Image: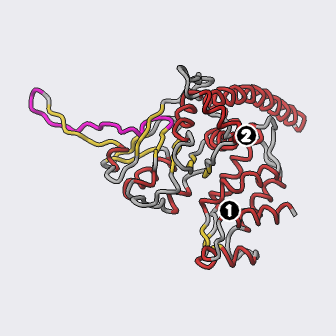
Amino acid sequence: MSVMKSATDAADEKAIVAAAEAALGEIALIRAEVGKVIFGQESVVEQTLLAVLSGGHALLVGVPGLAKTKLVATLGTVLGLDNSRIQFTPDLMPSDILGSEVMDQDAAGYRSFRFVPGPIFTQLLMADEINRASPRTQSALLQAMQEYHITVAGVRKDLPQPFHVLATQNPLEQEGTYPLPEAQLDRFLMQVDVGYPELAAERQILLETTGVAEAEARPVIDAQRLLQIQSLIRQMPVGEKVVDAILSLVRSARPGNGNSTTDKNVAWGPGPRAGQALMLCARARALYDGRLAPSADDILALAEPVLQHRMALTFAARAEGMTVRDVIAGLVKRAKG
C-alpha cells in the first residue's frame, strides 16, 4: 500500500514539475510582451503580475503619467482577458458599476424587469482613480472582490472567471478624494507603488513613444490557461520554515505580540488575510523566478507590497515623520537577523 502511495506521489510530483516548466515558459513570454510596451518598472510589472497569477487584485499607487493605465490595458491584452475600465468620479453611483434593472413592456402591454449588466461583468476591471468616488460607490466592489459575485435586487449574479480588479490611485491630489476604508484596502492582495523610471528607461520612453508607430503587445495565453496557472500555484509545496516566516512576520506587525517597536508605532496591524496573501504571492514569485517552491527570502521581498496597506501608525509615530514603510523595513531587518 505504501509503495502504491509513494508511486502516486512521485507521479503527482512529476506532473507538477512538468506543468511548472510549461507555465514558466509562458510567464517568460508574458514578461517579454509587456516589456515591449512598458519600459523599466520591472518591479511594478512583477508585483502586478504576481497579484494576477495569485488570483487576486492589486492597487497601483503613483503620480499621473507613469503608465499605470497602460500597464493594466497591456496585461488585459497579453493575458487574453476581457477587460473594461471605469473612471471613478464623485458622481459615480453603484449602479454605474454593477448594473441595474430596467422595465420592459411587450406588445401586449405586459411589463417585466430586465437586468442590464454593468462594466463589472468582465475578467479584468480597471478602477481608475478609485479614491475619487464616494465610499458608497467604492463599497460596490467589496462583495465582488471577495466573493466573485454581486447581488442586485436580492438576486445573485456570478461574475466571469477569472475576475481581477486592478485599481489606480493618485497619492498627491487629495482634494475631492475619499480615502479607501480598511475593509476595501484589505481586499487588495498587494499595493504596488509606481515610482519614476530610471534614466535609461525614461530615455527609451521618449524614443519609443513619440514616433509614427508604437509597439503593441500580443496575446500570449487566454483566460482558461490563466486559471490553470493559478491552480498550479496553489498546488506548489510550501515548507514549514516558510510558513513560520509568514506567521512570524505578520504577527510581529501587530501590536501586543512582543515587539516593542510595533507596540509603540502601530495602531493596528494586518489580519490573517495578509498571511494568506503572502502564502499565495510567495508561491507565484517562486514560479516567476523559475523555482518550484518559495523560500523565506520571497516572504521578506513581498513584505512591503502585501503589508503596507493593511497597517496604520499611531498619531505619535506619524507626528515623528515615520511611515508604514519604515516600520516594515525594520521588521524585515529584524527577520533577517
100 left or right, relative to 240: left
Question: What x and y, as percent, mark residue 232?
Answer: 70, 35
Query: Is tag 1's residue or tag 2's residue first in the polypeptide sequence?
Result: 2
Task: Give the residue furthest to the right.
Answer: 3
Considering the numbered disc 1 on the image, is that residue within a helix, a strand or a loop? helix
Q: Residue at x 82, y 51 (%)?
A: 297
Classify mark 2: helix, strand or loop: helix
Percent x, y of residue 295: 82, 48
Of badges 1 and 2, the one in the foreground is 1
The relative height of residue 73 versus residue 334 in the rendered view (above or below) is above
Q: Amino acid at mark 2?
A: Gln
Counting from the top left corner in percent of width and height, residue 172 is at 51, 57
Would residue 119 appear left or right of 41 to someone viewing this image?
left
Q: Which residues are magenta?
A: 107-124
Residue under the point 34% across and 37% down: 117
Q: Describe the colour scheme in one phrase.
A: secondary structure
Q: CA distance from mark 1 to mark 2?
A: 31 Å
Residue at 42 percent across and 55 percent down: it is 139
Report x, y in % for residue 145: 50, 48
**Which residue is labeled 2 in the image?**
235
* Residue 108, quarter of the rendered image: top left
Q: Could you tell me which quadrant the N terminus lies in? A: top right
- Foreground residue among 193 and 258: 193
Count up the numbered dots.
2
Task: Report the side of 44 relative to 99 (left or right).
Answer: right
Q: Is residue 24 magenta?
A: no
Q: Pointer 1 and pointer 2: residues touching (CB < 8 Å)?
A: no
Q: Which residue is mark 1?
A: 325
Q: Residues within 10 Å of mark 2 (few under 14, many from 20)?
A: few
